[in-house]
Image (cartoon, rainbow, N blue to C red):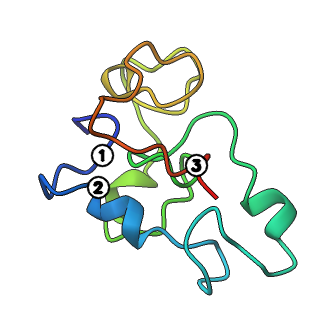
Amino acid sequence: MAPSTCCGKSTEGCVCAAQAKCSCGQKSAGNCTCDKASTENNIAGPRCSCRARPAGECTCDRKATENVTPSGSLCSCGARPADACTCEKSSDGLLPTETDFTTKK
């Protein structure tokens, strides 16, 4: 699952992050207004590759591969492969051209 911070489908930005929706499907990830908004809009811990949704709860078109329980060498949080860590323990950080959609309102 490389690169770890985006799906890599486009050089124009993260397509998957733009596709990510809250679990009710009404709004984009991080902008939920349904009764789950208090938890949906506060993402902490490991995330999917685009970092817009929690790991294992991906809603973009990569959900079939993103929501699979990883095996083998894992990130220190245990939720992602070691080479694709997306939690606070990740040492890769965002690239200068990437946007962290999990904190933008």
Q: Amino acid at mark 3?
A: Thr
- Point out residue 85 in the picture as x, y percentages from the top left corner: 43, 26
Give the image quarter of residue 95: top left
Above or below 17: residue 95: above
**Residue 79 location, x and y as percent?**
54, 33
Task: Name the residue beneath numbered marker 3.
Answer: 102
Given the current orientation, which residue lies at the most extreme bottom position? 26
Look at the numbered disc 3 and give the secondary structure of its residue. loop
Left or right? Give the position of 49 relative to 54: left
Residue 44 in the image: above or below residue 36: above
Q: Is residue 83 above or below residue 20?
A: above
Q: Residue 44: x, y in percent?
A: 70, 38
Where residue 30 sits, quadrant-wise, is bottom right
Dot 1, how many residues are within 10 Å of its Cα: few (below 14), some (14-19), or many (20+)?
A: many
Q: Which residue is mark 1?
A: 6
**Cα separation between marks 3 and 2:** 13 Å
**Residue contact at pointers 2 and 1, CB within 8 angstroms:** yes
- The residue depicted at 62 percent of the width and 71 percent of the height is 22
Q: Of the residues under marks 2 and 1, which one precedes in the sequence?
A: 1
Q: Amino acid at mark 1?
A: Cys
Position in image of residue 50 (x %, y %): 40, 49
Badge 1 element: loop
Amino acid found under the numbered disc labelled 2: Cys
Q: Residue at x 60, y 23 (%)?
A: 88
Which class describes the residues within 10 Å of circle 2: few (<14), some (14-19), or many (20+)? Answer: some
Q: Earlier in the sequence, mark 3 or mark 2?
A: 2
| Residue under the image location 59 percent in, 83 percent down | 25
The residue singled out by tag 2 in the image is 14
Give the Cα separation between the discs numbered 3 and 1: 13 Å
